[in-house]
């Protein structure tokens, strides 16, 4: 049927003879397990294969994939398995997968969270976007809490992310609460908002200052700019 098969080695289910040999899951044990399965398929003249060597321990997973990448040209499926809850699992997955992808290792990936699979997909996509491997949807640059903020950046960002989670077209947006870093970031985004005094906020379009937004609801203001951007590029 011309289907592919994934050899899925997992540190939590290594073969008993390998645990006896190596005493615990190690990169060498993970590689040997994958090699044994791969050899069995190749003896049957089957080569439509990809390989994963997943572990919940980031260091073990990363070291195993690095070792595997040196030993084979088969495509590799990345994952930090059983990573945990949405919060902690996202951090673990971002570190582990990010390290490998940055080194050019990996062809497909799975984010493994104790969460809705839709969340797993969103986290995986954000990892790829952060490394400029994929370019899709909103990319928001925004500042943390700070006494210089001239508007509620946190709630504004949350509202925009939720409202436009469906967007597939790549649109970069900077939402910064003051004029210290705001203009510099706005010059590199499609839409930029920089906080100003007395509710007067600078609006940048395509990296250039376009107008000043006075006494307006910024969620509505940014929404209209996003929708105009989508219409102009249909």
Image: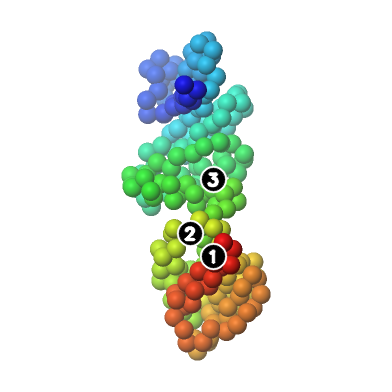
- Between residue 109 and residue 100, name the one nearer to us: 109
Which residue sits at x=47%, y=87%?
Answer: 215
Q: Relative to 228, is 137 above or below?
A: above
Question: Relative to 112, is 170 above or below?
Answer: below
Looking at the rendered image, the disc whose residue lies closer to the viewer, 3 or 2, is 2
Q: CA distance from mark 3 to mark 2?
A: 24 Å
Q: Which mark is residue 230?
A: 1
Assess whether mark 1 and mark 3 are in contact (beta carbons under 8 angstroms).
Answer: no
Q: Is residue 172 left or right of residue 23?
A: right
Q: Secondary structure at mark 3?
A: helix
First in sequence: mark 3 or mark 1? 3
Q: Residue at x 59, y 29 (%)?
A: 69
In the rendered structure, which disc, 2 or 1, sits on the residue that comes first in sequence?
2
Q: Is residue 113 visible?
A: yes
Q: Residue furthest bottom?
A: 198
Residue 57 % position (x, y): 43, 37
Q: Nearer the viewer, residue 231 or 89?
A: 231
**Which residue was labeled with disc 2?**
167
Q: CA distance from mark 3 to mark 1?
A: 30 Å
- The residue that disc 3 covers is 98
Q: Counting residues from the N terminus, which is met first, the one under dot 3 or under dot 2?
A: 3
Callout 1: SS: helix
Quarter-of-image position of residue 180: bottom right
Secondary structure, mark 2, is loop
Residue 126 on image: x %, y %: 50, 52
What whole-number distance in Å separates the C-alpha atoms at marks 2 and 1? Answer: 9 Å
């Amino acid at each position: 049927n011309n289907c592919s098969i994934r050899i899925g080695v997992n540190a939590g289910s290594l073969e008993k003879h390998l645990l006896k040999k190596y005493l615990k899951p190690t990169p060498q044990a993970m590689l040997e397990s994958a090699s044994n399965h791969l050899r069995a398929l190749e003896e049957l003249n089957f080569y439509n294969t990809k390989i994963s060597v997943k572990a919940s321990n980031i260091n073990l997973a990363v070291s195993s994939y690095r070792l595997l990448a040196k030993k084979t040209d088969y495509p590799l499926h990345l994952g930090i398995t059983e990573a945990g809850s949405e919060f902690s699992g996202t951090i673990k997955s971002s570190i582990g997968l990010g390290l490998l992808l940055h080194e050019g290792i990996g062809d497909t990936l799975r984010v493994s969270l104790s969460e809705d699979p839709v969340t797993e997909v969103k986290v995986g996509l954000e990892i790829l976007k952060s490394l400029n491997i994929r370019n899709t949807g909103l990319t928001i640059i925004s500042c943390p809490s700070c006494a210089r903020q001239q508007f509620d950046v946190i709630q504004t960002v949350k509202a925009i992310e939720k409202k436009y989670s469906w967007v597939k077209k790549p649109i970069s947006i900077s939402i910064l609460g003051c004029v210290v870093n705001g203009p510099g970031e706005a010059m590199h985004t499609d839409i930029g908002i920089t906080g100003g005094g007395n509710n007067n906020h600078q609006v940048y379009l395509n990296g250039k200052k376009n107008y000043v937004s006075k006494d307006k609801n910024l969620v509505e203001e940014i929404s209209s700019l996003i929708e105009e951007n989508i219409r102009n590029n249909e």
